[in-house]
Image (cartoon, grey):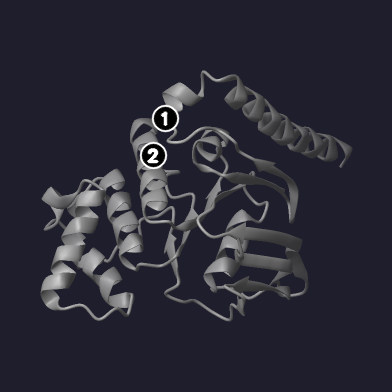
Amino acid sequence: MAHKIEIEHVSFEYEGKKTKFPALNNININIKEGEFICLLGNSGCGKSTLLSILSGLNKPSSGRLLIDGNEVVGPGVDRAVVFQHYSLFPWLTAKGNVLFGIKQSGKKYSKAERNELANNYLKSVELFEAKDKYPNELSGGMQQRVAVARALALESNILLMDEPFGAIDPKLRLELQELVLRLSKDNKKTVIFVTHDIDEALLLADRIFVMEPGRIKEELKVNLKTPRKREELVKTEEYQELYQKLFSLFYDRIREDIYEETML
């Protein structure tokens, strides 16, 4: 199977007033079509920076990013993004926000077809009954479901998600995780999902890339059965082994940070 996304020797530096701050150093990742990839790491390790390069919002300082063999030079409708903060248009209803995504897709639908599609996307995230409500009338979890529906409405092959459930209560977070996993597989999306939560990564990912500041520390393949339900997964030996391995990678990083601070 050909690679959908190729990240080749990508480095990135933020420009300060007097100096540059390295954020990524020689990142290399190949992603197949339909894979669900998690970038796992602590805050400040470069996960969101890498996602911003994938979205086209930032350009690498060196190296290149290819999608379907073509170099990425900026944002495009072939990639849909869901951020941690809901980023809905407050002057549009839930349905209006989804209709915006459909229009942005560039596909030529009639008004009736757009309405039907918007209704179907809202049904897929279980929000059809709230279609006429504005964002300020929706809970945080409902707003994020609208954001997911709008991202799906773009009909992009690639879905980029930057800790989209970080500010949501645990029960709803689990429901949204399972929803995104199901919808991404049903719609054959290639997903790159940023998280610092080990449980979340194990529930969602086909492969996990563990990051530490500026680089990939380790790649882990997740061979857990699908469809995945957390209450069933956590009881398996395979899950426990993967969890302990990921936890040890995090613990090593924290221990190194503590040691460096004590030496200052």
Q: Are marks 1 and 2 in contact (CB under 8 Å)?
A: yes
- Which image quarter: residue 150? bottom left
**Can the viewer see residue 90 in this picture?**
no
Q: Residue at image x 60%, y 60%?
A: 1
Give x and y (percent) for residue 197.
55, 38
Residue 174, position as x, y percentages in the image = 39, 35
From the viewer's perspective, tell me whether residue 101 is left or right of residue 12: left
Q: Is residue 41 left or right of residue 22?
A: left
Helix, strand or loop status at disc 1: loop
Can residue 150 be seen here? The reply is: yes
Q: Secondary structure at mark 2?
A: helix
- Is 121 or 211 nearer to us in this picture? 121
Residue at 51% from the left image edge and 32% from the top image edge: 225
Marking on residue 229: 1
Location of residue 220 in the rendering, given as x and y in whole percent from the top left corner: 68, 41
Label 2: which residue?
A: 178
Give the amino acid at mark 1. Answer: Lys
Quarter of the image with the C terminus is top right
- As measured in the structure, the alpha-carbon distance from the residue carrying label 1 to the one carrying label 2 is 7 Å
Amino acid residing under circle 2: Glu
**Residue 259 sits above or below residue 12 on the image:** above
Quick one: 16 or 215, which is closer to the camera?
215
Residue 248: x and y in percent read: 72, 29
At 14% from the left and 56% from the top, the residue drawn is: 131
